[in-house]
Image (cartoon, rainbow, N blue to C red):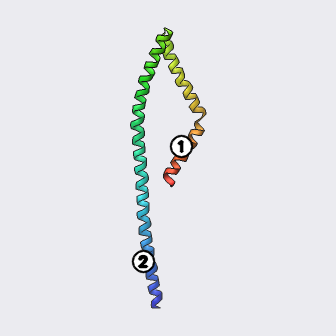
Amino acid sequence: MDSLKESSKYVAQTSERFLTANKKYYELKIFQQIAVATTSFSKIIVIGSLMGLGLIFLSFSAAFALGEYWNSTNLGFLAVGGSYVLIAIGSFILRNRLEQVIIQKLSKTFFD
C-alpha cells in the first residue's frame, strides 16, 4: 500500500513538473512569435515608407523626363500612371500566387 502511495505521489510530482515546463515552453514560444511579428511589422513599415517616398520621387522625375522627351508633360504623367495601372492589373491577376508564397513563408516562421 505504501508503494502505491509513493508511486501516486511520484506521478503527481512528475506530472506537475511536466505541466510547469510545458507552460513555460509555450509562454516562450508565444513571446518569440510576438517578437518576430512585431519586428517584421516594424521593418515593413520603415522600409515600405522609405521605398514609397523614393518611388514617388522617381515617378515624378520619370514623368517630367518623359514629358520633356515627348514635349508634353501630360503624356509623361499619363505614361507613368499607365505603367502603375498595368502593374496593379498584373498584381491582381497574380494575387493567388502571391498569397501562396506569403502563407508558405509565414507557416515556416510560425510552425518551425
Residue at 41% across, 54% down = 32
The vertical placement of 22 against 29, above or below, is: below
The vertical placement of 19 against 2, above or below, is: above
- Which residue, given by chain and number where applicable, does mark 1 sit on? 102
Residue 73 in view, yes or no: no
Residue at 40% across, 46% down = 38
Q: Secondary structure at mark 2?
A: helix
The residue type indicated by label 1 comes to Ile
Q: Residues within 10 Å of mark 1 (few under 14, many from 20)?
A: few
- Which residue, given by chain and number where applicable, does mark 2 sit on? 13
Q: Secondary structure at mark 1?
A: helix
- Percent x, y of residue 14: 44, 76
Point out the residue furthest to the bottom here: 1
**So how many labels did they put on this image?**
2
Q: Quadrant of residue 25?
A: bottom left
The vertical placement of 101 against 63, above or below, is: below
The residue type indicated by label 2 comes to Gln
Residue at 39% across, 32% down = 50
Residue at 51% across, 16% down = 78
Q: Residues within 10 Å of mark 2 (few under 14, many from 20)?
A: few
Is residue 3 rendered to the left or right of residue 103? left
